[in-house]
Structures are given as C-alpha cells and as structure tokens.
Image (tube, rainbow, N blue to C red):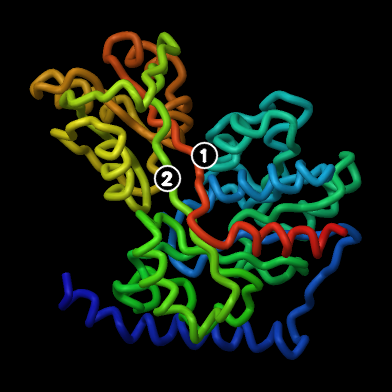
C-alpha cells in the first residue's frame, strides 16, 4: 500500500498545483464569487469524507433556528443519479428519493423535518432558487469549503483528531482535498470525533499555529439502538454486553465500530462497504448469510446506511423483517469551543 502511494505522489503534486492555482484565482478575483442577500454559513472539510460533517450541519441548522432564523440547506448531493436543481424536502415532508437526492441530504431531511433542503452541483444557482421560492432567510452550505463560487459569511472546517496525526498527502496518494495551509480561509476549525478533552488538547496543539483561537471540538455520542422494522428502542443505559454484527459504507468505518462498542455491544463480525455505497440484492444476501453463519444476536448499521437501503424498496423491507437490524442513533456533543461557534453565528446573523 505504501509503495502504491509513492507511485501516486506525482499525481498528488499535480492535484496540489491545480487546487493552489484555482484558489489563487479566487483570491485575486479571476474566478468570480457571488453574494446572495442573506447570511451563508459553510460547513466543509479538507479531506475526502468521514469527518462527521452531516451531523454538524444539523447542529448549525438548529443553532440558527434557535436564533429565530429560517435556514435552508444547500448541498451538491454526492452520488445521486440526477443533475441540476432538486428540492429534497420542505414543509415537513421529503419529496425526493434517496437515489435522486443522495444519501446525506435525505438523512438531513429525516432529521430536519421543517427545513428546506435542496441539491445542485451549482450551489450559487441553488441558493438563489431556494431564496426565491421559500421563506428561508439564511443558507447552510453543506460541504462547501472548496465550492468558493458562493460567498460565505461564516466558513467552518471539520478535521478529525485522527487525521491530524496521519498522512497529510493530497489525493490520490492520500485523503486530503487541500493542504493544512488552506485552513487560513476558515473562520473556525472544528476537531471532530474527539474521544475526550485530552485528545482535543493534543489535536489543538498540532493546529494552534494554523488556527490560533478559532478551534472547537465535538464528538458523536451513541444514544440508542432502534429496530428498523418494529421501532423498538434500546437505551444506552440498558448495559448491553451481547454480540452484534455491524455493517456500513462510510469514509471512517472504524469510528462507527468504536461507537457501537462505546454503546456497550460486543462487535464480532464487521462488514465494510465503500463510502456512499448503494446496496444491491447481492449485498443483502451476503449480509444475511454472514449473520446466519455468525453468533450475533442482531445487526447494527448507521443512519446514513439505513437511508441508502431505501433504494432497494421491497427487497429491503423483506430484509428488515427477516433479519433483526438496528440503527445506532447518535447525538453531537461539544467538547470545547461551542461558545466560540455561537458567537460567530450571532455575529453573522445579527
């Protein structure tokens, strides 16, 4: 694996050169930045997924709502089978399928029932249309750090604690979209998936020269397990110590495994699919066989994977009835810097 990465380094250098020139063009005004007449808050990252961005977008939306604002979420809709503008949800109901909209926008739609959520590869066009067709008075730009065509009033970047001590190579040799130096464009850097305050302090030390006093941290706390067929909910306080099988298609499957273990389950078999994986009937057959051959009492997956399973419609409903499948429900929790984030939001929405 290391030798393969070395062979890819020339392509990573080319990638760095392209992104550097592109950012320079934005900085000097060759590439145009469009402003809209409402505050725009961007939540993004400098790596290719797995930072906990989707739940943090939900955090920002709820903070804006608590200030009396009516935010709309604009996303690219990564992995969807459609192109152009599509409204995913609004008025308390989802109006687009997961295949048409993408898994993360639909996951947000499930969690933010009364929030307008739209997807478009052209975020400027999406923001203008949302503002013209809805009562939204601010925009939350999902995965917007590299999408600089739309002006943002608040630029938040997420980094995992793990990636601060790992490889810093850019794509394709590594996992970075941009170098750590790009954090100078961020108003706040949020260290995600911190286990505790000690891990935060270590990560903060590594970032202090780049982000100074603009650093916050949060983690995802496992709250409950919910049966996707019956709705039965198992609280974390139940003190489970039973064997389970887990599966996921994530950028950071190891983090999901740790969360299930933190909940109290004993993870036996772990089946991993690529990030944003669209499940097939063959995948369900494989999962059913793996479960039957193991000694797990039930399966556990993520909220995002549960959303993607919807694309199979009838096949997934049969699967849910035949196999005891639970979704791990998590909640974001700040470790540090929440007041700083609140003050930045207050500043741009006064």
Left or right: where 282 falls relative to 331: left
Q: Mark number for residue 103?
A: 1
Q: Is residue 272 above or below residue 229?
A: below
Image quadrant occupied by the N terminus: bottom left
Instruction: Give the image location of residue 159, x and y in percent.
Output: 46, 65
Q: Say the numbered circle drawn on residue 300.
A: none
**Is there a contact, CB below 8 Å, between mark 2 and mark 1?**
yes
Please tell me which residue lies in front, 139 or 199.
Answer: 199
- Is 345 or 282 nearer to us in this picture? 345
Q: Residue at x 74, y 36 (%)?
A: 115
287 displayed left or right of 102: left
- Picture coordinates of residue 283, whole percent (x, y): 27, 30
Q: Which residue is drawn at 49% across and 69% down?
A: 46
Residue drawn at x 55%, y 36% is 107
Quarter of the rendering occupied by the C terminus: bottom right
Residue for badge 2: 276
Closest to the observer, 106 or 190: 190
Badge 2 element: loop
Q: Which one is nearer the viewer's eye here, 92 or 25? A: 92
Q: In this view, does 133 lie above or below 158?
A: above
Let me know if residue 81 appears in the view: no
> Looking at the picture, how far across and down is residue 266, in whole percent?
17, 32
Crowd band around label 1 with a 10 angstrom C-alpha radius: few (<14), some (14–19), many (20+):
many
Whether residue 7 is visible = yes
Badge 2 density bin: few <14, some 14–19, many ≥20, Cα 10 Å: many
**Which circle's residue, 2 or 1, is located before the other in the chain?**
1
- Vertical comparison of 270 with 200: above or below: above
Residue under the point 17% across and 23% down: 242
Q: Quadrant of residue 286?
A: top left
Q: Quadrant of residue 51?
A: bottom left
**x%, y% of residue 119?**
67, 46
> In what element is the residue under mark 1?
helix
């Amino acid at each position: 694996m290391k030798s393969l990465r070395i062979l890819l380094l020339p392509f990573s250098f080319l990638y760095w050169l392209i992104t550097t020139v592109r950012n320079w063009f934005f900085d000097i005004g060759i590439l145009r930045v469009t402003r809209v007449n409402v505050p725009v808050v961007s939540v993004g990252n400098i790596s290719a997924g797995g930072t906990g961005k989707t739940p943090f977008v939900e955090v920002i939306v709820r903070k804006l709502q608590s200030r009396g604002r009516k935010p709309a979420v604009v996303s690219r809709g990564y992995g969807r089978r459609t192109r152009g503008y599509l409204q995913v949800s609004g008025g308390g109901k989802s109006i687009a399928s997961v295949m048409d909209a993408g898994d993360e926008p639909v996951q947000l739609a499930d969690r933010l029932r009364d929030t307008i959520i739209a997807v478009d590869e052209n975020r400027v066009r999406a923001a203008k249309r949302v503002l013209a067709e809805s009562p939204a008075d601010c925009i939350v730009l999902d995965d917007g750090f590299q999408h600089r065509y739309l002006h943002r009033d608040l630029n938040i970047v997420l980094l995992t604690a793990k990636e601060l001590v790992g490889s810093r190579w850019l794509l394709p040799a590594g996992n970075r979209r941009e170098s750590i130096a790009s954090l100078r464009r961020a108003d706040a850097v949020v260290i995600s998936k911190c286990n505790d305050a000690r891990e935060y302090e270590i990560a903060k030390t590594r970032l202090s020269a780049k982000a100074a006093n603009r650093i916050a941290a949060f983690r995802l706390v496992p709250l409950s397990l919910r049966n996707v067929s019956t709705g039965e909910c198992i609280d974390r306080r139940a003190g489970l110590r039973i064997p389970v099988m887990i599966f996921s298609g994530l950028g950071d499957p190891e983090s999901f495994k740790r969360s299930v273990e933190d909940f109290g389950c004993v993870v036996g078999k772990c089946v991993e699919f690529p990030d944003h994986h669209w499940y097939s009937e063959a995948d369900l057959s494989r999962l059913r066989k793996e479960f039957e051959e193991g000694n797990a009492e039930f399966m556990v997956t993520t909220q995002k994977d549960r959303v993607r399973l919807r694309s199979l419609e009838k096949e997934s409903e049969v699967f849910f009835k035949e196999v005891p499948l639970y979704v791990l429900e998590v909640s974001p929790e700040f470790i540090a810097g929440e007041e700083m984030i609140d003050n930045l939001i207050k500043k741009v929405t006064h």
